Amino acid sequence: MTLGRLNADDWHGRRVLLTGHTGFKGAWAALWLSKLGAKVTGISLVPEGKISLYTSIEDSLNISSRILDIRDKDALDQAVQDCDPEFVLHMAAQALVRRSYRQPVYTYETNVMGTVNLLDSLSRLSNLVAAVMVTSDKVYLNRDDGKAFLEVDPLGGDDPYSSSKAACEIAVASLSKSLFQDSAARIATARAGNVIGGGDFSEDRLIPDIWRAAEAGEPVTLRYPNATRPWQHVLESVSGYLIFLQALAQDTKRSLPSALNFGPADQAAITVGQVAAEVQSAFGIEEDYSLTSGHQPPEKTSLALDASLARQTLDWQTRWDAPTTLKKTVDWYKAFSDSQDIAALTLSQIEEYESLIHE
């Protein structure tokens, strides 16, 4: 089994279903898979907002794009049958915590039933080799004690988003043992979060909020500046997903775990405020951040993942430390603001990161 790196030969011409391809992480994954020569079908909603990474790089993507809602069982089933994938990377989700308070039903419908719909469709395929369902670092029962979570820790969630992803984990575990009990296909989940990098324009996310404030020449407004998170570049998590899929396909002894954490090796506590100060300075904003006024939905103060199992079983490891991650992110947004060739820049960061994997 080849571990710790991506092999183009394992991906070239392989049929890959990528859900959520118009989202932030999905667009990075789509470009990387295109570079590897995979035959990608993307399933997703129309990109949100006036600007997105996907629309910025769409012309450079060699993929078949299907715009549909994974809650639409019939449309999803037809798209899956048409693609007949060998590999599946499922990232389509309602991924915003604060939005989940406003739209709890939609959040559960998308994150739980959307995944159930997909697995039901996949269960009728004969050529499926492996599928990785992406959940979140927030699937764990977090008592806010600073503990770095292991894959065996209890699942939970105090907000609709977190609990929907924990419920998704339970659904995947159950269906993989029932719908796929007679299948050779491997079904697994991947847990990562607090991903940053160029091209995220979502609401209520730290780096996009800082960039928007910098564009307006103002300091950013923060909700919980003392909160710590397992920050990592988007390429770290996407590399983990793809290496996991690749390894599952070669795991003839079925020895790999069915769930893995992907997070930074350095668990040093880096607060939201510290990240904001460094990124604002890089954007030329020297004023301190301000605090959001009024009532805010509660958030956990600490969150950390223990990714040692991924390192042990996949030889996966992070390549960019926090300063490098922030620099690459700021470089991307500066280039975007300067109307540079975003597809070329994004691809160059993938190539730089990929070269570190193959060292």
Image (tube, grey):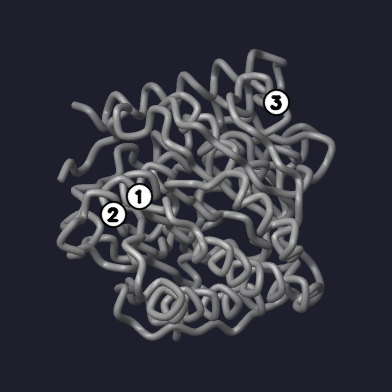
Which residue matches tag 2?
Answer: 248
The answer to whether 285 appears left or right of 134 in the picture is right
- Asked whether, in this view, residue 178 is left or right of residue 227, the answer is left
Pinpoint residue 169: horizontal percent, then vertical percent: 47, 75
Q: Residues within 10 Å of mark 2 (few under 14, many from 20)?
A: many
Q: Check the picture and name the quadrant holding the C terminus.
A: top left
As helix, strand or loop, the secondary structure at mark 3 comes to: helix
Residue 292, which numbered label? Answer: none
Q: Are marks 1 and 2 in contact (CB under 8 Å)?
A: yes
Whole-angstrom CA distance, mark 2 to mark 3, is 32 Å
Which one is nearer the viewer's eye here, 280 or 264?
Answer: 264
Looking at the picture, does residue 162 appear above or below residue 232?
below
Q: Sort mark 3 into few (<14), some (14-19) or many (20+) by Cα contacts within 10 Å.
A: some
Sequence-first disc among 3 and 1: 3
Residue closer to the observer: 273 or 43: 43
Residue at 53% x, 67% y: name it. Answer: 119
Asked which secondary structure carries label 1, the reply is helix
Mark 2 falls on what kind of element? helix
Circle 1 residue = 245
Q: Nearer the viewer, mark 2 or mark 3?
A: 2
The image shows residue 255 at horizontal and vertical percentages of 17, 65
Quarter of the figure with residue 320: top left
Q: Closest to the observer: 221 or 15?
A: 15
Give the residue type at disc 3. Ser
Q: Is residue 87 above or below residue 334?
A: below
Residue 56's disc is 3
Looking at the image, is mark 3 or mark 1 nearer the viewer?
1
Asked whether disc 3 touches disc 1, contact meaning CB atoms under 8 Å apart, the reply is no
Residue 301: x %, y % from top left: 51, 73
Mark 1: amino acid: Leu
Residue type at tag 2? Leu
The residue shown at (44%, 69%) is 303
